[in-house]
Amino acid sequence: MISYSFLNGSVQSMPPTSPQWATIVPLLVNAWLDDYAARPGSDIVETQADNFSYLFDIAAERLIAAWGVSRGRNAHERDAARMRGHPLSAGQLYHRGHAVPHTLGGGTDINLVPQLGRVNIGPFRPLEKRAVATPGSLYFTYWSYRGSRGAGQVPTGVDQGLLIAGQLPAVQRHGN
């Protein structure tokens, strides 16, 4: 997995009144692509939806990373019918987890990943809530598939991060 220590100085020295995420995002994307690159036959694209960006492996049909700047609490209702229509083939222990939380503005479709229920409604929540409460912060998730069977679509882990200008990065690693 990735060590995010390369972010410490840049994020901590960034002025809170004018965060410059445009200089940080390419560093993150390169780290994620370097880590993921060991998978042969991948076809990675970057796309955007609902004010967030996503790295997606078309060949393996799986999400690699999601990121975006917090605009505070999302007031839109969750599209429950759309979520019900999203496949849930990982088994009963898994939820249709959001790479970017709905409360932050994350949608469905590309933003949904099979996530262990105990992680989704447990240790994943505090950083999500902090991102919602901190407009201007950069929130990200990087999904690892190391050790998954074949070209599996169920991640084996996720790095969840919140970057707040003027503070040390908060990055947590969760098994899946």
Image: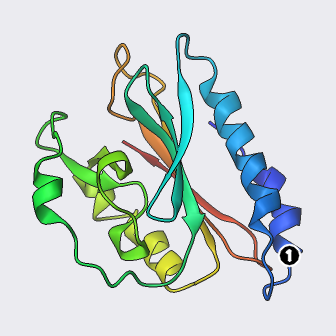
Residue occupying image coordinates x 30% and y 48% = 109
State left or right for residue 96 relative to residue 3: left
Query: In x, y percent, where is residue 127?
Result: 49, 71
Say if 169 sits above or below 131 in the image: above
Judging depth in this view, the residue of 82 and 25 nearest the camera is 82
Q: Which residue is mark 1?
A: 14
- Which residue is located at x 52 percent, y 60 percent? 52
Count of all numbered marks drawn on residues in the image = 1
Q: Is residue 16 visible?
A: yes
Q: Residue 154 vs residue 105: left or right? A: left
Q: Residue at x 51, y 65 (%)?
A: 51
For residue 120, side relative to residue 58 (left or right): left
Query: Where residue 83 sits: x, y (%)?
Result: 17, 55
Q: Where does the image place residue 110, in percent across and percent down from the top left?
A: 36, 46
* Residue 141 seen in the current view: no
| Rendering coords of residue 124 (x, y %) | 40, 63
> What residue is drawn where x is 53% and y is 21%?
43
Q: Is residue 101 above or below residue 118?
A: below
